[in-house]
Image: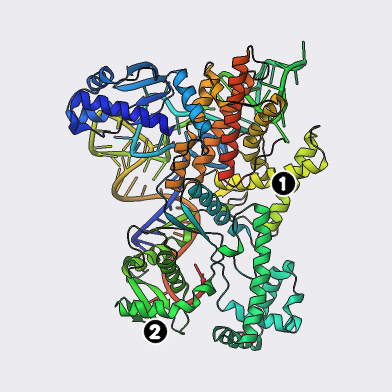
Amino acid sequence: MSALIDTLTLRFDQAIVAAFGDEHAGTPPVLRRSNRADFQADVALGLGRKLGRPPREIAEAIVAKVDLAGLVDKIEIAGPGFVNLSLTGEWLAREVRAAAADARLGVASETPETVVIDYSSPNVAKEMHVGHIRSTLIGDALARVLEHVGHRVIRQNHLGDWGTPFGMLIEHVLDTSGGDASSLSIRDLDVFYREARAKFDGDPAFAERSRRRVVLLQSGDAKTLELWRLLVDLSTSYFGEIYARLGVGLKSGDVCSESFYNPMLSKVTSDLRDAGLLEDSDGAECVFAEGFTSKEGKPLPLIVRKTDGGFGYAATDLAGVRHRTATLGATRILYVVGAPQQQHLAMVFAVAAKAGWLLPPARATHVAFGSILGPDKKMFKTREGGTVKLADLLDEATTRALAIIVEKDPPHLDDAARREVARMIGIGALKYVDLSSDRVKDYVFDWNRMLAFDGNTAPYLQFAHARTRSILRKAGGAVDAADVAIGTPEERALALALLGFGDTVSGVAESLQPHRLCTYLFDLATVTTAFLENCPVLKADDAATRASRLALCDVASKVLARGLGLLGIEAPEAM
RNA sequence: GCGCCCGUAGCUCAGCUGGAUAGAGCGUCGGCCUUCGAAGCCGAAUGUCGUAAGUUCGAAUCUUACCGGGCGUGCCA
């Protein structure tokens, strides 16, 4: 669409200048898809007000001047001054051919920036659970989209691997395995954490040992660090398994955890002090940013260093901002973090700006998201009220998908293929449901809905793709985009949809809203299946129509696969 | 108390910088398989866009107030 919109914009601009003079150059034509034509231009309404003339008169003047020969079949003015445009099949065909020839399928490349994306961020020695899924999936999708439009993306997995809990965890390692943590199983980690927690809460002597252990850890005691490292390695390899199953692009090299920033914290604090930003308040060292007030209406502090001398997570986050701009060279930092952290992050950004660590063009954005709710509209829990483990969620997704496939009993898939497809569908459904609604809102988790083959779901999109692939396989021979011609209403609708891919992806890179890509893909899949229903491809009336439809099939297939790919979802060849 | 977020069909959700009769899916009702994949397609019905004002030629969209729900509001991260 980009190329198409660009051309129309240019022609309208020329017409506006010709009709009303140079001072109106660059007036946006306000083009959008229309249900009464292919596009409508709403510029006359705004311009009418500006010029104090009736909008219809403005529209007539523009239409009289605009040169759309060969591009537009029909141009008419309707209502108060809408300009409705119907494109020629020739032009649509030409644009589809161009998009098909483009390796990026019509997605424009942007001026490259270095973008840091902070996402996933599970805690060491704890199981990944439903609370981590949104950050992981949204962050991964955004990383893919931003990379695709040409940015240099640096993924950062801000693991929780430091702080007071590690005292009790290490003591518990010593208690249970005599210091040999290698006997610990990955699967035991969550249980292990809970046991340590229970002992910490119930056994004062253990709690005291734990506190001493924290001191040893922070002072760099070799034996303590060794045990700590063991826990971290165990966890990261477990996280790696989950990421691999999810198809998330986070690697061990992307880990940049709390402990990484630990050596920088005293410098962060002293630099804040030198800059005159740090104040002592009730024994804690704080920075006060304007615009944040507490319950009592007093200024709200960002606590950098606690009364006990320990650093708060604000200190780590500030060190993170500085590292990302100064060392990694980021000009855009995305924090894919739950909505409740809004105020904290706003304060961190404000303080980082005051300290000079986050200056234009660099900026930070909180990519906030809502909660996953259970059927009762409360936080999603297991039937027993426990935390839902991510690993269990992945198991159930593939199990349920496989059950559906077995029930459908597709003759063209053997057992191995069924299992593989079930994996793609199950994981895809889980990911898609998380990405397909506005991320800032809460959503209700429902297996049946996400795995349905109707509606705005991953399986529906995957099925549309599989159908196009099936036809292309049966066609056998080469497909040539040069054959594309647009005739029927379904072909026209498909062409228009295909040409919208570029603008959609650019829009997602800007708004950071993956659900817009989902909405687009659902529309494309709907239009594609309508095309397949109404326009015989292999059995087309003549060779030229067959070649054209085959080519359309091919482009649709590629855009669907690419679009799903940008969401981190696989598209099976058959299902 | 203050701040942020949310409120669109019975249910789950779209609705892009204000634009024409507010759109999907599920569910309901009715059609379509000797025809490239019926895991599909086509059609029908369904709304005080939380409420009330305001700005505007025009508001689901912008402003304000209120109602309802969620979250945050100094030493957990």
SS of the residue at dot 1?
Answer: helix
Q: Is residue A227 above or below residue B34?
A: below
Q: Is residue A86 above or below residue A210?
A: above
Q: Is residue A438 above or below residue A86?
A: below
Residue B17 image position (x, y, % from top left): 33, 39
Do the CB atoms of the residues marked 1 and 2 lie less than 8 Å apart?
A: no
Q: Which residue is mark 1?
A: A423
Q: Are marks 1 and 2 on the same chain?
A: yes
Percent of width and height locating residue A37: 42, 20
The numbered mark 2 sits on a residue in which chain? A
Instruction: Measure the C-alpha gap from mark 1 to mark 2.
Output: 54 Å
Who comes first in sequence, dot 1 or dot 2? Answer: 2
Tell me the element at label 2.
loop
Which one is nearer the viewer's eye here, A251 or B70?
A251
* Place of residue A153 in the rendered image (x, y in percent of width and height, measured from the top left): 49, 55
Which residue bears the numbered disc 2? Answer: A283
Residue A15 placement: quadrant: top left
* Residue A371 at least partly seen: no
**Residue at the image point whose x is 64% and y is 42% from the top:** A450
